[in-house]
Image: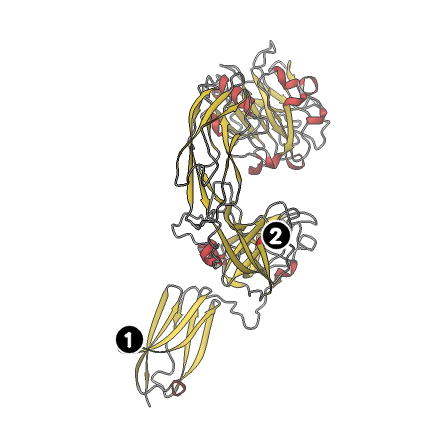
Amino acid sequence: MKVKIYSMLFFIFSASILFSQRVVVNEFSQGPSGSKEWLELLVINSNVNLSGIKIKDGNSTYRLIFKNNALWANISAGSIIVVFNGGDKDSANLPPNDYSFLGDYKVVIPHNDTSLFSTSSTGGWPSGWFANTTNTDNPAIVNPDDSVIWDWNTHGPGTSIRPGANQVSGYGSNSVAGMTNSANWIRGAAFTATAGLGNNPDNVAWINSLRGVVLNTTVQFTQAGYFYSENAGVITINVSISNPSSTNATTVEVALTGGTATNGVDYSNFTTQTLTFPAGSSANQSFTVNIIDDSEIESDETIIFTLQNPSGGTNATLGTITTFTLTIQDNDTPIPLLPVSVAREDLNGDWIPDRLGQMIKLRGVVIGPNYQTSNFSYYIQDGNAGISVFRSGSTLPILNLGDSIEVKGMIEHYRGLTEITFSNTSDLIPLGTGAIPEPQILSISSYKSNPEMYEGVLLKFTNVIKVGGTWPTAGQSATIQIAQGTDTLDLRIDSDTDIDDNAEPTWPRNTKGIGSQFTSSVSAVNDGYQLLPRYYSDFEPATSIEGENINIPNSMKLFNIFPNPFNPITKIRYQIPEHGQVRLKIFNVLGKEILELENTYKKPGTYELEFNADKYGLTSGVYLLQLTNRNSIATKKFILMK
């Protein structure tokens, strides 16, 4: 019988009084602060009947008993059973993709499913399956007649690997006998537990062998291509392997199969190479190509490499990425200086910048400090567009709020965040001190309707309340949720700011920060939007500020002119719901533009101005007043009578 499962954890079992180990412990966790526990059980023999099997702790207290249920009567080898604390679940401790390779052989069940489990009246889960110390309440498994199948204190690897608070232990070996060896157990943080903990390549291969699945060895490029500057020199290109054989080495050829660049002219002469993956090794293999830097001004050129003739391993075959396109960008052509808004363009709407991998120059004003301790990470803003500026491995040069800079680098995209990355200090040029832009005042609803537009921009949300999360203590980071009405937004507080050193403010607040993004996974592109406050002072009292429009309209509107007809003075009133360029023009009845009253960038709000026709020399007649904001246009007719 195939059993459906879901997360990460294994336990050791037996359905026989003869002590034959038919189920083993692969992973288990005490969980944060001794709560949110879970177990993961791996079935290693077919036709296992778990009915009546008991789980107890080192104090001999029964925590969980498998009931006599048809689900437990005949379980297939290779199945995984995850049991979690149904009364105190923490989704962060149950990574959803931990065992996706198992297909129909996985199931996740809460302990308080009374049709499948019963608990002891003297201490059943969740009253403390694993204690807060690493020396007590260790798991043991017994038969229905109370004979011990497996006990940590007898069969486990030792106290050094037991999970403490917020920790998980994982068994990663390719045999049951190997589980008593401490080297085959790993301990890590429960909130970062992944398939690598208790599920290394040997373990995965073992699980699939239990299921009768033979996984072919596959090799492929780690990515389909990349852009390199002509002066990059020697380029290393990686090839990865999946499901390596423990006994047979794997080989694959790398051949030059095309491209517009000339072999021996634009790059050093390249001939077909053979890469060898040693038996049992999952490490990448690589080859190099040397780009030749010339002084010729030319367009981008490409080199195409193809993998061919895989052999060895376990029925070695090619994966999905069989070609790698190396694009050489000419460094003799001046790198373009672009507005940030142009650098961020996503005209095809795939949530990824169109200039990904291109070398460009940008200018902007620093709007926030660097809170990373080993990398350079600032946000700059150019007009109404912003971007992250990143340099790995160095915090230099150090910038101040309001510094105006020019940076030369490559457009990258990491966890949804568009950024320009640079390598050398000389790639960043100080331009003096600039004007720090005023924050754009938005409603959360307006922000979430187009969050990419506000990425890297200084923003302000008025009269927000906290609706979720816990304010951080000193030295801690936290994500809390703020809201305006029913609209909510994640607010990420970094431990290196001064925010966590201060008490939680009273709500509501007017809250400033930088629009940012950190997606839920490396493959996601359009979630994880958040606001990054810079200082504790970014949380302002929620009071009306003179000169700002706190009440944000829901739509653009041009109100009726009053008085109308008039001579020569009247009032014009309009409202706009978003930041943007506002144009106010007057046309005659034939559609000819007579004059432009306004052409300026404005915040959302309601505006009123006095119009004196004599000032502009208008004569009596019928005119049209036109308001334009973003893609919206409104028109009103008025009559001047002299």
Query: Which of the pair 438/445 is nearer the observer?
Result: 438
Mark with earlier residue (2, 1): 2
Residue beneath disc 1: 591
Instruction: Report x, y in % for residue 412.
Output: 50, 47
The reply to whether dot 2 and dot 1 touch (C-beta < 8 Å) is: no
Q: Residues within 10 Å of mark 1 (few under 14, many from 20)?
A: few
The answer to which quarter of the image holds residue 624 is bottom left
Query: Which of the pair 222/370 is nearer the observer?
Result: 222
Q: Quadrant of the N terminus?
A: top left
Marks 2 and 1 sit apart, C-alpha to C-alpha, by 55 Å
Q: Is residue 412 above or below residue 322?
A: below
Tag 2, which secondary structure? Answer: helix
Extreme residue in the top direction? 18
Instruction: Report x, y in % for residue 209.
Output: 49, 17
Q: In the image, what residue occupies the spot 62% across and 17% down?
A: 178
Image mark for residue 425: 2
Q: Amino acid at mark 2?
A: Thr
Q: In the image, what residue occupies the spot 47% across and 36% down?
A: 223
Query: Which of the pair 211/370 is nearer the observer?
Result: 370
The answer to which quarter of the image holds residue 327 is top left
Q: In the image, what residue occupies the spot 53% across and 25% down?
A: 81
Foreground: disc 2 or disc 1? 2
Instruction: Report x, y in % for residue 141.
Output: 62, 19
Q: Amino acid at mark 1?
A: Gly
Extreme residue in the left direction? 590
Q: Is residue 498 above or below residue 39?
A: below
Extreme residue in the bottom direction? 642
